Amino acid sequence: MDSRAQPRLAVLASGGGSNLQALIDAHARGDLPALVALVIANRAAAGALERARRHGIPAAFVGRKQHADPDARILELLREHRVDVVVLAGWLALVGPQLLAAYPERVLNIHPGPLPRFGGKGMYGQHVHAAVIAAGVAATGPTVHLVDERYDEGPILAHVEVPVHPADTPESLAQRVLREEHDLLWRVIRDHFCANSSGG
Ligand code: GRF
């Protein structure tokens, strides 16, 4: 990557894509000197694909049924779009070794709870928030970490605390955490992957 250039991001998102939107918005505001250059979803109906198209960002659906080797197809797309950093935002599949080897320490994930306690296989979405409430902890909050070949286990880059209220449901907690995710993800990308975070 040219150190003067803005890093080119690929966002892998199979859900609604509100975190993707937060990155697009942060870039448009001038807060994030990194460009969303590609969006990939593994569900054809993912809201993230629609958001990407609305902003003129190349968007691809890579399904397990459509592609014998989805990771190879994803890698091909990343290369085609000269992607520097891969951001998993609501991507539920494991990332294959081929892709991790091609992007060492350049694949990150946002998780909606504290790690390692509320992570691992099956710990995603409302399962995380339900487990947090069941554990009776006073605080939760999103975690951004580098990705390795296991679920939610790579080095942690940032975590923000969000209080758990006695009346919280998994849904109410998810909303409060998601708001913090939107403010956290672009900051982590700016601080860790942008050469000159003060712009210029
Ligand atoms: C977020 O809560 C993120 O932490 C988790 O999946 C959710 C994605 O939400 N990995 P969205 O698709 O960005 O709205």
Image (cartoon, helix red, strand yellow):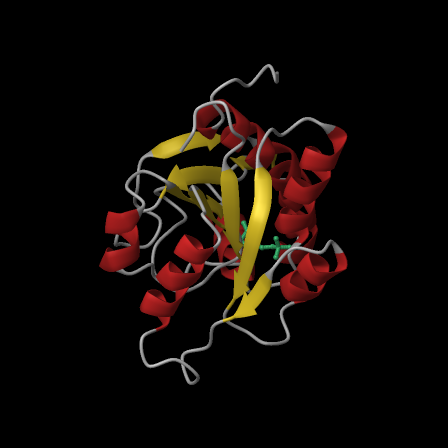
Which of 46 and 101 lies nearest the eye of the viewer?
101
Which of 19 and 54 lies nearest the eye of the viewer?
54
Residue at point 51%, 44% (across, down): 9
Residue at point 71%, 59% (across, down): 51
Tally of marks: 0
In the image, residue 131 lies at what x, y percent? 48, 54
88 left or right, relative to 48: left
45 over 11 or under it: above or below: below
197 left or right, relative to 29: left
**Residue 176 visible at all:** no
In the image, residue 2 lies at what x, y percent? 43, 29
98 over 68 or under it: above or below: above
Which of 71 and 130 lies nearest the eye of the viewer?
71
Residue 77 lies in quadrant: bottom left
Which residue appears farthest toward the bottom when viewing the image?
Answer: 65
Residue 23 lies in quadrant: top right
3 over 75 or under it: above or below: above
Q: Quadrant of the N terminus?
A: top left
**Residue 146 visible at all:** yes
In the image, residue 194 lies at what x, y percent? 49, 26
In the image, residue 113 lies at what x, y percent? 49, 44
Which of 18 and 36 lies nearest the eye of the viewer?
36
Residue at point 37%, 34% (across, down): 156
69 left or right, relative to 185: left
Q: Quadrant of the C terminus?
A: top right
Residue at point 44%, 57% (across, down): 80
